[in-house]
Amino acid sequence: MLALRDLQAALAGIVRGEDQPRLEAAVIGDAITAAARLRIYRHHIEQSLTTALAATFSTVQAIVGEDFFRAMARRYVAGDLPCQPVLAEYGAGFPAFIAGYEPATSLPYLADVARLDWALNFAFHSPAANHLTPADLSSLPAERVAELPLALAPGTAVLRSSYPIDRIWRVSQPGAADETVDLGVGGVSLLVLRREDDAAFVGLSEAEEAFLSAVERGETLEGAAEVGFQTGGAFDLSTTFARLLALKAIAATQHHFVERVEKAL
Amino acid sequence: MRAVAGIGLRSPHIAEVAHDRPATGFLEIHAENYLTGSPALRTIERLRGDYEFSLHAVGLSLGSVEGLDDTHLERVAALAERLAPALISDHLAWSVSGGRYFNDLLPLPYTEEALDVVVGNVLKLQDRLKRQVLVENPSCYLGFAHSTLSEPAFLGELVRRSGCGLLLDVNNIVVTAHNLRLDPAAWLADLPASAIGEYHLAGHAVNDADGEPILIDDHGSRVSEGVWSLFDAVLERHGPRPTLLEWDTDIPALGVLFEEAARAGHALKVRAATDARAA
């Protein structure tokens, strides 16, 4: 008799495509064999998880078509089953998988589009958190503001691609006009954000991207500004910072810091 | 909760329900769809003023020998606290092994060993939530030769030892009975009626396995006539309970769900009236 632990491990093996003769022998078969009965579960798991990936990576599916997507997703699912039951949080490893997926090598931008889909999904499912506002800063002396350690708001991400994935993403949405994208226009830096009712992305200049990447690393405003200026481009700190505050891209973890500073003053 | 008919609220219908606030007995949502910070949870919270809710989990994996996942349990508990639903349920099944989640309601052998596992997990869940949960009979596509208990007998023991209630899915009885060559009437006769806290109704598909018809619990069509007649038999035997109409694949217009729920609501009323006359 199969102990429950062994039975569950064996069924997990079936899902990964293994033969499990002991499990098969424990299943009652008749006109429908034990193997066929086990296959129903395997197919459902494969099917439901590829459907979940198709929902999260809808732009990738729009680009490659459903059949190609499902074949690719099935391979990924077999090697990287979810670690928890919230399907919106499944697929973090799919962009990297796509980057190494042989049949997709003719679409070198596909993995980056997948990263964008994932970042948008992640932003959408991130908690709506307080963000840093101009009012938080206005009461502080400039040198205090410069010393503020910054962080990106929850769900916010900076994405860099060597391909124009913003345009590729837009022309691949349902109902988009039938346009072609010239890959020759080159790469792009994007800021992905959670908004009130959805998630979205905006384009970033090279200096803005450098500034935000420094923020992502936990730099102070002063430190991140230095990184921005070092890019050599025309970096306008006050315009950039005002834009990022308006986009609600900076976390309000400094609220408490600001309050402490105010009390200390 | 009163013995009324409600619908499973799925994402394509949320905006319409939030805007129109159509009348229905109650709404059921899947817990796993509301555990992130997405704006959807806020919408559900706003609907709480107009509707009673049932929180139906699909991923607690009550049958896992490795026990409940504490992280997931805490997330579900936090959601339950936030929504204070009238009912909370999950399934007599498992979906986690070796820390991996299979996104399906996988079958258990009905043995003493499995009973100990499920009882332990249900007790832990009820301890954490500080309330009774309902456990639903699953749709099965296979049975194990070493099972020593029937499914209803297993559920009866689970109720007795854990104090949980039952969510009786009438479609699942039809699907399991067909696939495992069981008699639905005999299945029903073995069940502890007083523990039933909710009924589920849904459509199923008829697929082909090795050239033989097999029923698949896809929640993708109207409730079959066979399930409606068994629902009448269930009501006659066990009495009216809150009844939910589920539809999860090829989801139609909201009106179709309400038509189906209205038919369930009518059956509940007819049975309640008959019972009242008999009393």
Image (spheres, grey):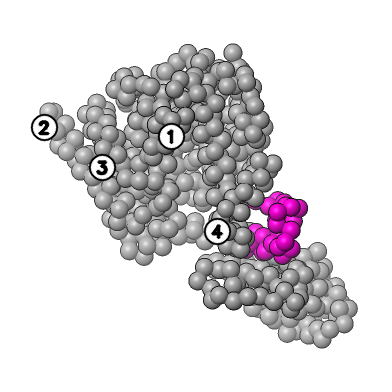
Looking at the image, tell me whether mark 2 or mark 4 is earlier in sequence order. 4
Task: List the residue tagged with mark 2.
Answer: B277
- Kind of residue indicated by mark 1: Asp
- Kind of residue indicated by mark 4: Ser
Q: CA distance from mark 3 to mark 1?
A: 29 Å
Task: List the residue tagged with mark 1.
Answer: B208
Tell me the magenta residue range.
A91-120
- At 59% from the left and 21% from the top, the residue drawn is A23
- Residues A256 and A69: in front is A69
Q: CA distance from mark 1 to mark 4?
A: 39 Å
Residue B227 vs A25, above or below: the answer is below
Q: CA distance from mark 1 to mark 2?
A: 46 Å
Task: List the residue tagged with mark 3.
Answer: B264
Dot 3 and dot 2 within a common chain: yes
- The quarter of the rendered structure image containing the N terminus of chain B is top left
Looking at the image, tell me whether mark 3 or mark 2 is earlier in sequence order. 3
- Kind of residue indicated by mark 3: Ala
On the image, the x and y values in percent for residue B197 come to 35, 34
Q: Secondary structure at mark 2?
A: helix
Q: Main secondary structure of the magenta part?
A: helix
In the rendered image, which quarter is residue B226 located in?
top left
Dot 3 and dot 4 within a common chain: yes
- Kind of residue indicated by mark 2: Arg
Looking at the image, tell me whether mark 1 or mark 2 is earlier in sequence order. 1
Q: Secondary structure at mark 1?
A: strand
Task: List the residue tagged with mark 4.
Answer: B38
Does the residue at mark 3 contact the one at mark 1 (Cβ under 8 Å)? no
Q: Nearer the viewer, mark 1 or mark 4?
A: 1
Left or right: residue B57 versus residue B196 is: right
Dot 1 and dot 4 within a common chain: yes
Residue B168 covered by magenta stretch: no
Does the residue at mark 3 contact the one at mark 4 (Cβ under 8 Å)? no
